[in-house]
Amino acid sequence: MQIRDYLIRRLMVLPILLIGVSIIVFTLTRIGGSPIGIYLSHEMTPEEVEQLEERYGLNEPLPVQYLAWAGGVLSGDLGWSGVAVAPVTAVFGDKLTATMELATAAGIVAVTLGITLGTFAGSRRDRLPDHLTRVFSVSGSSMPDFWFAILLLIVFWVYLGWFPIGRSDPAIWASIAHPTGLYTVDSLMAGSWQALRDAIWHLILPAMTLGLATTAIITRMMRSSLVEELNEDYVDAARAKGLPERLVLKRHARRNALIPTVTVIGLSFGFLLQGTVVVEILYQWPGMGRWLADAVLRGDQATIMAYVLFTSVLFLTVNLAVDIIYAYLDRRVVLGS
Amino acid sequence: MAEVAQHPPVVTTPVSGPLAVRLRRLGEIVRQVLRNPVTVIGLVIIVLMFTMALLAPVITTPNEPNPYQMPRDWSALNEPPGTPGHPLGTTAHGGDVLYGIIWGSRTSLRLSLIVVGVTVTIGTIVGSLAGYLGGKVDEFLMRVVDIFLAIPELIFALAIAAMLGPSFTNIILALAVVYWVKYARIIRGQIMHIKQNDYVDSARVIGDSKFHIYAKDVLPNSFTPVMVQATMDMGSIVLVGATLSFIGLAEAGLAEWGVLVSEGQVGISTGRWWASTFPGLMIFLWALAFNLVGDGLRDVLDPRTESR
Amino acid sequence: MTATAFADTTSGRSGVGLVASVQDLSIHFQTKTGMLHAVDEVSFDIRDGETLGLVGETGCGKSVTARAFMRLVATPPGVYAGGRIDFWSSETRAAGGGPVNLLTIPEDEMLGIRGNRIAMIFQDPGKALNPALSIGDQLAEVFYQHRSDELLDPLGPGTPAVVRRAARQEATRVEKILLKVPPLRSQANRVKAAVDDRVAAALADTQIPNPGKIMDRYPHELSAGMKQRVLIAQALACDPDLLIADEPTTALDVTVQARILELIAELLDRHDTSVLYISHDLALVRGMCDRVAVMYAGRIVEIGLTEEVFSDPLHPYTRGLMNAVPSSAHRRGALTAIIGSVPELIDPEPSCRFNTRCPYAAGVCRRLDPRFLRHTLEHGVVCHAHDDPAALAARPDEMPSFARVDDAR
């Protein structure tokens, strides 16, 4: 099977990329001053510092240091987070679920809205809706997300008071159990409408902010690939069968236009991840992004590196998955390669 | 026939040949770009921004000793727009918002020009090496490119800048490290593509040296997509740069839009909206303008990949 | 511009049934520099059961004319600038009704005609099939669209509305899920089975081996010839009154071409379908068609019975075309190409469009539109040289003079 060959080839590149990323991350830890910086204080004598360095293997040659570090990472030792005052891995879980909930919400908004808007514009090419959509997508991808967040906060939080900030109302949060850590899922499992409403209410503004740029990108891609598909012969052939325009668009053109859009969805996953940093700062969302921002300001190397490693692995995995879906959806690709 | 009507012919001939021909083609491109009103709007914004940046020392009284540092007027904290002497208001630390906007444009211009200049150079060198030498070198360099692309841009730049310590110079450095890969990819792709084209072969037959072919045919042809990408990056670098300084990776009090938004952000809960709204608008307009022009350029230079 | 108003030789004759009649059809395209007259006051009839060939070079407007029958010219940039296409469907004829004008009937009525009473075979079978849908699914659409009543018949009058809607391809996403649930599933499956039977029969009709297997295949898994068979099966699925074949073999290998042509000829014979056969290949048209119309730069310049046109071509362009076709009668090197190229068709002035390439062109050809002249009962031409030879510098041996025949209309 050709799909399998393609997959194997893709999978074989993955470790190389992962090793490469880990080397970059390791290099970064060595350019930013001593990796044991957070343990050092002014009262320490040079001998004490040297002892510490020896204890952490910093007097060994770099490749040995790298191997030791990489071995640690593989065995789940990502170091000590000075910000969280705990091992990185210990705090990771909670922060991750909070961020994932936010990113998923934003992703759902972006994908549905992007595909809908793109279809709407692409099937009305060069007419008013198309032009308006273009204005939206260009503005959306030029918008600094921190500024957009501030505008939303000024309007909806400060002046109108419609939406809260943070992730939850602490009293409501405490009223239900949290088996998954995803507030929406937990509230559903607890059957509490009050908690669900609270969860969604807190999600709306951050998800909108985070999803804006991604929505713009998906809209743009969907629009242009739909325009391309609508120019294909098979669309006319479908019309020639007597199919109503609704079916021609839905079953034929849009379905195929979705195929290239899937790739963009994968790539824009990176946008979602990096966007969480700013969004979580502004909406006081207790996730990985805010944690990273704190770590950056306090020079918490271990946290920053763990974050970079983790995002890259996630990003690579998602894109691999997208490639697989793409190969499966577009039978022409497999045949062509 | 229907196809002819839908896609009116656009000049797509490669840029090469005598200087006069090239200049004429450049003139044609400029004319076509200017035909699109949206692109013209973008160009006007860019011209205004550049003018503001260049005239900054003239239209404001530069802060001593470092004009890129916000002047502090401790007698006018949190003044709303319209206050005499502070037309756009002041921040909680007595920073004049208008001063920050004007000198911020200068900071942005510096940032984007340096980063684009450096990354295009590095990207061209790496991409040319990979494309021209091929084989193992190509394989290796392209893997490196892939690895760089595996880390989301902002996160990568954030990590580098954080490791180097908070300063605007380090932001510039971090962005340069992150942004060169795209150009290397473009240049290499173009060289691979052009290598297979007939006119390079014919140049070979005529007996041109390898470097001559490179300088005369390959580089000018790779130029088109690089120009589109560079235009887009002029905008997005300022966007990402401002994000990094918003997070806190630039010096406090720097006359930079992201820093200003961050300084103004503390006031929004008490209704002081202006200190972050105005500089944020500038970032948006800057990015928007370059996006519009980049789009327009792409439409003209490469009509096949429709950007809209 | 009655000068080009072109009356087909059959008009007014009784006893010959028509399937379609095109009158003064004009289709223009909006371009940046002006209106492009892609089809310019074209008139012709398609008779019951005949195969009419429409020949001309690329860009002469023959494909646009063909698409107009399906009302598939994209508007904008296309504009239906004038004329009509009357169509007599077997259904309305059986009910004693007259023709409908395909250019003006409402869209839902047009949907009932497309793929049902008029069908089309496209030029490139590789592009005319949706790459992401299986062959069976694509063929099934035709039956769902036009034969849903017959599909539902065996299920009886008590069939739930959801199943009916599904058979008419109107089911919503929620309803589709409902149809997967037991009480409705069996009925939905019966409809599906009925469709599958019809799809398999249609495929078998085009001599596709193993139709049941082919149904589950995707277009890229089939050869070009096989794909064209599928498209032919799809076109003939509802037994149309008129088939529009737009260069159906151009994109195929020569060996496959011959077999597909044989198949088309055999099927047409069996289905008794009228055909508008678009081609640039004269030899092919000669073998396939009863009558032939020659098109040049948006206009028909000559029309007649195939043997008449081929044995006695009247228009200089037709003659040029025939000289440009290699045949055993030509000596090596005697093949002549028509010099020059097709004129700009953007906002053209009155003139014979061929004047830029015509060896006999004179002043009148550049000033006036030529008109239709009847040479024999079936054979007509649009050319100044045949209208008033004295006005031009035509050599008498090349240009036989004709009695002037007034417009039949």
Image (cartoon, rainbow, N blue to C red):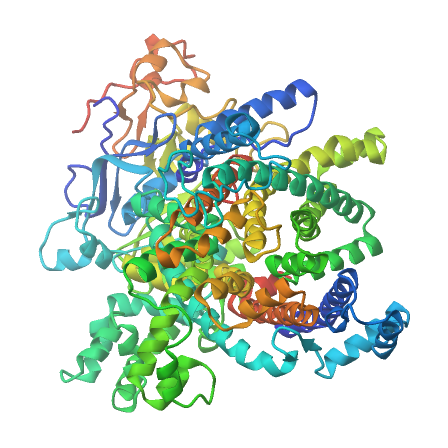
| Quadrant of the rendered image containing residue B119 | top right
Position of residue C256 in the picture relative to residue C138 (left or right): right
The quarter of the image holding the C terminus of chain A is bottom right
The reply to whether residue B294 is in sight is: yes
Judged from this view, the residue extending furthest toward the left is C96
Q: Nearer the viewer, residue C376 or C204?
A: C204
Of residues A96 and C3, the one drawn nearer to the viewer in this rendering = A96
Instruction: Using the rendered view, name the quadrant where residue A27 is placed.
Output: bottom right
Q: Position of residue C54 (x, y in %)?
A: 37, 40
Given the current orientation, which residue lies at the most extreme front position?
A: B75
- Residue at horizontal 27 percent and vertical 56 percent from the top: C114
Counting from the top left corner in percent of width and height, residue B52 is at 51, 30
Instruction: Name the spot of residue B130 as percent of width and height, x first.
Output: 78, 49
* Front residue of this view, candidates C339 and B266: B266
Point out the image quarter for the N terminus of chain A. bottom right
Q: Is C215 placed left or right of C401 in the picture?
A: right
Q: Foreground residue, C128 or B42? A: B42
Q: Is residue C369 left or right of residue A261?
A: left
Query: Is residue C115 visible from the viewing direction of this image?
Result: no
A266, above or below A190, in the image: above
**Rendered view: A38 above or below C41:** below
What percent of the width, then of the height, locates residue A178?
Answer: 44, 88
Q: Is residue B162 above or below residue C166?
A: above
